[in-house]
């Protein structure tokens, strides 16, 4: 079968790899912003500051966008850590993509590899409770979790968190735990009975190699995770894209922005219309089946534009979801006076879970140390002069961390993607989002519980520094074309097949009917592989 | 679209928006106004009053469609409401029928459909006027706009006043109410659609914005737009506010910020029921954020335009040298100075003339030397966290933490031990307190003296 895949993010590449292994002809069109060469691959974090020809430009960007200043409006806030300039290529948007938002500002990617080129590697399987709204069970998707874990390399451990993370195969040994993490975990081991299972701490699941593979090293603990792993230990989908390229039946076409589909009179897709980024008229790509894997926002844009172009209708794709995130900086008192070690794994090495009465509303947390993140976004928040702030920061840096709490989301009417006719050649893609009215109560209760839990572990939250991140910064956009066993407009079958356009399949996050609190990328990849296996 | 239309209330804020849209269209428009108005191309003004048919009936000879916007609003007395809204509409309808006018488009209000209209003469009289239209025998459409916002609309002025308060008071009945604000331009578009399609089938159609919002959420969205941040909302029982207002209203109406009747807004949802007109409007309705941006463009966008045209690299390099001495205790390198100057230009921090008087004062003190810079910074860390001095120092911090050897100040890996760390923190506390008190003396007292003199 000739299959046209749109998008080279985590779902596009894993769908394609599965389809290629089954012998299908796969063409992938993608904007495909490419990763620039890695600077000084052998250097560690401090080595970059010492040996790069212009470290200031590397860490802050040529136009200094990497510098975090106090928010211009008092209601806004400056993030404690942002995405570094070395990853700017992940977020560059083609000029043909236009977007406006109402209380929902997503981070979008048009990179080869998609947003997961800048992910933090959290790889957590959804459990039966979290899959209750999905039209398949854990048993159905488990083989694909195992397969993805084999492909990408997932490190972790079966510990107390196994209660929230159902079992799958191919779990590799975890990374070496840093000193602060060891203290927290030891403290938890001593006190675990006290929490009575309502709060649990354990090793996180990371898509990071702890043993080398061909073309990818094992983690060398160089401390450069945030700035871009230099040796391939940290998985990103561009590695799977490279693997796809080794197949003779794969054709990768970067440099194109897909605008919409042309339909036949019977409502099937006849061709995809794409524009070369360099300019020129639209070009047509045809196939037997069309796969949308551009990420929920871009996928929805293509569907909306197709409906607008073919039927002159502007529709709303309701049910937009994202995880609300809360960052709570803490200080691990056991680390006071201990030295700071930049040569360690930088993203979350520990995870925690807060169990709720409704099991699917489980609150997922990760403990991020980010010792090699820039200091200035943190120290500007201390109520002292910047010299004192720097000295205090250096004294306590080894014990600083951020508890990153994630909350689940549900599909609700009024949260949607649509087009807005602003008089330009094409209407602009528009997002609207309003929080669940239960959110403030749930968030406050979870924060209190997490605060008590961390204080008890000897790592109290720093007063006044907890940040509720704005909607859209969760980067887990889902729900606009949900999977449903019952046929309905603007939804897809359990195997991703559109109920509106019969030869269209959606394999990305747009198809999620519910968004659990856990990081979703692992499930995105497993689901894409599942659809490739079931429907093709 | 109708070839001859007659608009009442041409001087009101919806009327003005409608007439300016009519300019240049192949339509003959008469507009009834009570006082002379600025000329609009293609519009012929008729000076008069709806209660006085003699002032306008001549224009009805050629009129196909009347668009009836005129109404008493605001703090009118119940008698004034009745006279304008009921008797005015009755007179207009009678005159129109006698002259053979075919179509009647009545712009009513969402309040006409409120279930709770206690003390609200405006809503009651608009509902009565709607009934007169329905019984008139003319082909008609009634549209009921929700909360109509425009830069000149009284409700927008009130919303801004409320939203600027440090705590937003919100009278509330049994539950939070929802609103669906709509821009006056979109109400005008709704009128145009009815005219274009000649849709006079006796319908009553709600017209609102793109989505409904809880009123408290909307008030805070307005506040974020004009002030930059949200405020807590204090809910008060609606009855406690409404009853006393109704009692004092007959004598104190002109002095009240709001009437008892207007409190109905807090007792009823003001949202548009779906209808064909809303479906036609929908694709071009602005989001709430876009609507607010149209009404009050954010100041922050303008603030960022402060890029200097008088960049003085040498001055900025000197500043980088001094501030590096303050922050890191060593001299800066040429690279840091070059980047500092470029980053200040990029982040609109290069031109003192764009800063506030206090920012200039703080910078002047900081430029006197490393100790002065620390005192000024300590003072600003409490009283001007987002000011120009702090921003410049944060830019420099970002630069010097990125490069060896100044990064040692942030990345040092030596371990002082528990007691050493504790002692260091105490010592830092003392030195900060000294700098802070000196900052208060040098900047705070000077500031206080100046404001006393002023």
Image (cartoon, rainbow, N blue to C red):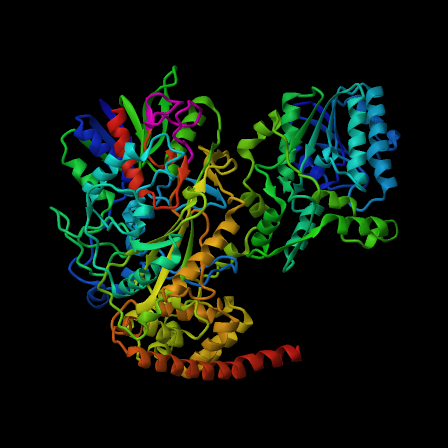
**Left or right of A442: which side holds A399?**
left
**Left or right of A517: which side holds A27?**
left
Q: Position of residue B122 (x, y in %)?
A: 79, 39
Vertical side of B328 occupied by A258: above or below: above
The residue drawn where x is 80% and y is 47% is B75
Residue B30 lies within the magenta run: no
Q: Position of residue A469 (x, y in %)?
A: 44, 53
Vertical side of A253 occupied by A351: above or below: below
Name the one closer to the observer, A324 or A356.
Answer: A356
Q: Position of residue A355 (x, y in %)?
A: 41, 49
Q: Quadrant of the N terminus of chain A?
A: top left
For the view shown, which residue lies furthest in the top direction?
A266
**Left or right of B174: which side holds B232?**
left
Magenta-drawn segment: A479-505
**Left or right of A366: which side holds A76?**
right
Report which quarter residue A55 is drawn in: bottom left
Name the one closer to the observer, A187 or B160.
Answer: A187
Residue A377 seen in render: no
Q: How many marks?
A: 0
Q: Position of residue B439 (x, y in %)?
A: 50, 81
Residue A487 lies within the magenta run: yes
The residue drawn where x is 46% and y is 66% is A463
Magenta-drawn stretch, dominant element (helix, strand or loop): loop
């Amino acid at each position: 079968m000739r299959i046209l895949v749109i998008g080279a993010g985590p779902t596009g590449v894993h769908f394609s790899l599965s389809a290629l292994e089954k012998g299908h002809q796969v063409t992938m069109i993608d904007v495909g912003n490419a990763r620039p060469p890695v600077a000084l691959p052998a250097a560690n974090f401090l080595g970059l500051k010492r040996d790069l020809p212009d470290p200031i430009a590397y860490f802050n960007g040529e136009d200094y966008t990497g510098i975090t200043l106090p928010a211009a409006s008092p209601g806004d806030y400056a993030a404690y850590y942002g995405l570094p300039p070395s990853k700017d290529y992940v977020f560059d948007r083609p000029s043909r993509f236009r977007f406006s938002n109402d209380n929902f500002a997503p981070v979008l990617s048009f990179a080869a590899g998609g947003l997961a080129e800048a992910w933090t590697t959290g790889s957590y399987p959804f459990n039966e409770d979290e899959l209750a709204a999905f039209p398949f069970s854990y048993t159905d998707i488990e083989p694909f979790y195992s397969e993805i874990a084999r492909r990408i390399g997932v490190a972790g451990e079966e510990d107390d968190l196994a209660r929230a993370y159902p079992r799958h195969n191919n779990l590799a040994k975890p990374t070496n735990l840093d000193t602060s993490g060891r203290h927290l975990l030891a403290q938890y081991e001593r006190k675990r009975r006290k929490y009575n299972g309502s709060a649990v701490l354990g090793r996180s699941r990371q898509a990071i190699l702890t043993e080398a593979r061909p073309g990818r090293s094992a983690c060398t603990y160089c401390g450069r995770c945030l700035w871009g792993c230099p040796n391939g230990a940290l998985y990103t989908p561009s590695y799977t894209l490279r693997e796809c390229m080794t197949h003779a039946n794969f054709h990768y076409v970067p440099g194109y922005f897909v605008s919409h589909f042309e339909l036949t009179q019977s409502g099937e897709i006849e061709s995809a219309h794409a524009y070369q980024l360099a300019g020129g008229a639209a070009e047509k790509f045809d196939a037997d089946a069309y796969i949308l894997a551009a990420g929920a926002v871009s996928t929805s844009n293509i569907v909306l534009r197709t409906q607008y172009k073919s039927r002159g209708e502007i529709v709303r794709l309701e049910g937009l979801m994202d995880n609300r995130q809360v960052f709570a900086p803490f200080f691990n008192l056991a680390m006071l006076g201990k030295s700071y070690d930049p040569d360690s794994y930088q993203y979350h090495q520990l995870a925690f879970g807060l169990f709720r009465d409704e099991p699917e509303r489980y609150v997922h947390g990760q403990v991020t140390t980010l010792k090699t993140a820039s200091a200035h976004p943190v120290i500007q928040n201390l109520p002292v002069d910047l010299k004192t702030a720097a000295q205090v920061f250096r004294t306590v840096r080894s014990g600083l961390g951020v508890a990153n709490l994630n909350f689940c989301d549900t599909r609700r009417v009024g949260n949607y993607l649509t087009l807005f006719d602003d008089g330009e050649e094409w209407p602009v893609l528009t997002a609207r989002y309003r929080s669940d009215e239960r959110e403030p109560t749930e968030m406050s209760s979870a924060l209190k519980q997490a605060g008590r839990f961390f204080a008890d572990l000897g790592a109290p939250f720093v007063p006044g520094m907890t940040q509720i991140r704005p909607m859209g910064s969760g980067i887990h956009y889902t729900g606009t074309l949900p999977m449903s066993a019952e046929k309905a407009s603007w939804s897809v079958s359990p195997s991703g097949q559109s109920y509106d356009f019969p030869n269209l399949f959606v394999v990305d996050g747009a198809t999620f009917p519910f968004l659990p609190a856990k990081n979703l990328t692992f499930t995105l990849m497993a689901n894409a592989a599942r659809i490739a296996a079931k429907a093709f | 679209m109708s070839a001859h239309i007659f608009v009442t209330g041409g001087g009101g804020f919806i009327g003005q928006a409608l007439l300016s849209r009519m300019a240049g269209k192949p339509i003959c428009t008469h507009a009834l106004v009570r006082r002379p108005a600025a000329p609009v191309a293609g519009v012929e003004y008729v000076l008069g009053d709806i209660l006085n048919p003699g002032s306008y009936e001549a224009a009805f000879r050629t009129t196909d469609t009347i668009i009836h916007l005129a109404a008493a609003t605001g703090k009118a007395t119940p008698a004034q409401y009745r006279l304008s809204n009921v008797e005015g509409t009755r007179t207009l309808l009678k005159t129109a029928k006698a002259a053979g006018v075919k179509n009647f488009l009545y712009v009513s209000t969402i309040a006409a459909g409120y279930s709770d209209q206690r003390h609200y003469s405006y809503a009651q009289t608009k509902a009565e006027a709607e009934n007169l239209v329905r019984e008139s025998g003319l082909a008609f459409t009634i549209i009921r706009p929700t909360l109509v916002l425009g830069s000149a609309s009284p409700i927008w002025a009130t919303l801004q006043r409320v939203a600027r308060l440090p705590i937003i008071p919100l009278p509330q009945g049994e539950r939070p109410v929802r609103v669906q604000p709509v821009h006056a331009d979109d109400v005008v578009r709704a009128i145009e659609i009815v005219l274009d399609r000649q849709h006079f089938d006796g319908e009553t159609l709600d017209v609102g914005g793109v989505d409904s919002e809880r009123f408290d959420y909307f008030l805070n969205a307005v506040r974020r737009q004009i002030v930059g941040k949200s405020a807590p909302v204090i809910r008060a029982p609606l009855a406690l506010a409404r009853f006393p207002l109704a009692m004092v209203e007959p004598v104190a109406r002109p002095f009240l910020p709001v009437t008892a009747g207007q409190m109905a807004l807090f007792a009823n949802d003001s949202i548009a029921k779906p209808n064909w007109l809303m479906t036609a409007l929908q694709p071009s309705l602005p989001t709430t954020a876009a609507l607010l941006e149209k009404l009050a463009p954010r100041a922050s966008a303008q603030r960022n335009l402060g890029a200097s045209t008088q960049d003085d690299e040498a001055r900025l390099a000197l500043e980088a040298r001094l501030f590096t001495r303050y922050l890191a205790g060593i001299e800066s390198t040429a690279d840091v100075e070059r980047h500092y100057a470029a980053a200040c230009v990029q982040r609109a921090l290069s031109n003192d003339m764009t800063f506030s008087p206090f920012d200039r004062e703080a910078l002047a003190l900081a430029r006197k030397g490393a100790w002065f810079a620390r005192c000024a910074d300590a003072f600003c860390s409490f009283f001007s966290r987002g000011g120009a001095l702090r921003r410049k120092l944060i830019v420099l911090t970002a630069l010097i933490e990125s490069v060896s050897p100044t990064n040692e100040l942030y990345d040092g890996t030596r371990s002082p031990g528990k007691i050493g760390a504790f002692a260091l923190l105490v010592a830092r506390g003392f030195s900060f307190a000294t700098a802070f008190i000196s900052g208060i003396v040098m900047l705070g007292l000077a500031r206080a003296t100046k404001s006393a003199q002023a």
